[in-house]
Image (cartoon, rainbow, N blue to C red):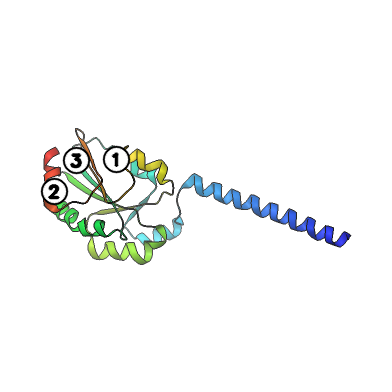
């Protein structure tokens, strides 16, 4: 009987320590909100994609200078997003001398970075691409725009005087018209 009690005691103490370690790990992940290992992040991106959490993205979204920003939220798994990306690329090329900056913010899953996102960006995009690696979507979505449901594609067009938010796809002409309206 003593032997069974001793084994039971070892199991309880061992499981308790494992649970404490597990909760510490979970707390650490929640605090950082990042899921990509920093060493892996540096190796994989090679200046192709800037990886940020919401705190890293926030300064861009409140820029108050003489540039007009077009910030598009998209993902490689979103067909309407991928369909409209060439329009953002064309806009970026057409307005490069007019203080218009296009930033494409990918909401791809971090586990898809190496096999899906980086190859797609290298083969298809010249605009600046950021990966938003922040697990707290319920926290950052309303900070981007109070009206945003979280659906993509979504685009913000803004400068120091105006700010417009769109939760929809664009054609090139529609995108160009919206940018022209605040230049």
Indicate whether 63 appears above or below 19.
above
Name which residue lies at 25% across and 66% down: 123
Please tell me how crowded label 3 is: few (under 14), some (14-19), or many (20+) other residues with Cα within 10 Å. Answer: some
Asked if residue 133 lies left or right of residue 18, the reply is: left
Q: Which residue is mark 3?
A: 67
Q: Which residue is mark 2?
A: 174
Q: Earlier in the sequence, mark 1 or mark 2?
A: 1
Asked if residue 74 lies left or right of residue 91, the reply is: right
Measured Cα–Cα span from mark 1 to mark 3: 12 Å
Q: Can residue 183 be seen here?
A: no
Asked if residue 169 lies left or right of residue 49, the reply is: left
Q: Are marks 1 and 3 in contact (CB under 8 Å)?
A: no
- Image quarter (top left, top right, bottom left or bottom right) of the C terminus: top left
Please tell me how crowded label 2 is: few (under 14), some (14-19), or many (20+) other residues with Cα within 10 Å. Answer: few
Asked if residue 26 lies left or right of residue 125, the reply is: right
Q: State the mark number for residue 61.
A: 1
- Residue 112: x %, y % from top left: 38, 62
Name which residue lies at 40% across and 46% down: 137
Which one is in front, 62 or 22?
22
- Residue 78: x %, y % from top left: 29, 58
Given the current orientation, which residue lies at the most extreme top position?
A: 161
Name which residue lies at 35% across and 38% down: 143
Q: Earlier in the sequence, mark 2 or mark 3?
A: 3
Which label lies toward us, 1 or 3? 1
Q: How many marks?
A: 3
Q: Earlier in the sequence, mark 1 or mark 3?
A: 1
Secondary element under disc 2, as helix, strand or loop, is helix
In the picture, residue 67 is in which quadrant? Answer: top left
Which one is in front, 13 or 43?
13
Please tell me how crowded label 1 is: few (under 14), some (14-19), or many (20+) other residues with Cα within 10 Å. Answer: some
């Amino acid at each position: 009987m003593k032997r069974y009690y001793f084994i039971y005691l070892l199991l309880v103490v061992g499981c308790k320590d494992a649970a404490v370690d597990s909760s510490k790990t979970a707390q650490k992940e929640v605090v950082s909100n990042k899921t990509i290992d920093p060493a892996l992040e540096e190796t994989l991106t090679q200046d192709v994609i800037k990886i940020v959490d919401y705190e890293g993205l926030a300064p861009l979204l409140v820029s108050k200078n003489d540039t007009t920003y077009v910030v598009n939220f998209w993902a490689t798994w979103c067909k309407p997003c991928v369909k409209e990306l060439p329009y953002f690329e064309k806009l970026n090329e057409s307005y490069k001398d007019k203080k218009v900056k296009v930033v494409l913010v990918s909401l791809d899953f971090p586990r898809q970075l190496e096999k899906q996102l980086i190859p797609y960006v290298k083969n298809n995009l010249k605009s600046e691409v950021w990966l938003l690696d922040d697990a707290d979507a319920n926290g950052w979505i309303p900070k981007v725009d109070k009206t945003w449901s979280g659906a993509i594609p979504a685009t913000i067009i803004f400068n120091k005087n105006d700010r417009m938010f769109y939760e929809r796809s664009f054609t090139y002409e529609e995108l160009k018209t919206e940018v022209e309206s605040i230049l």
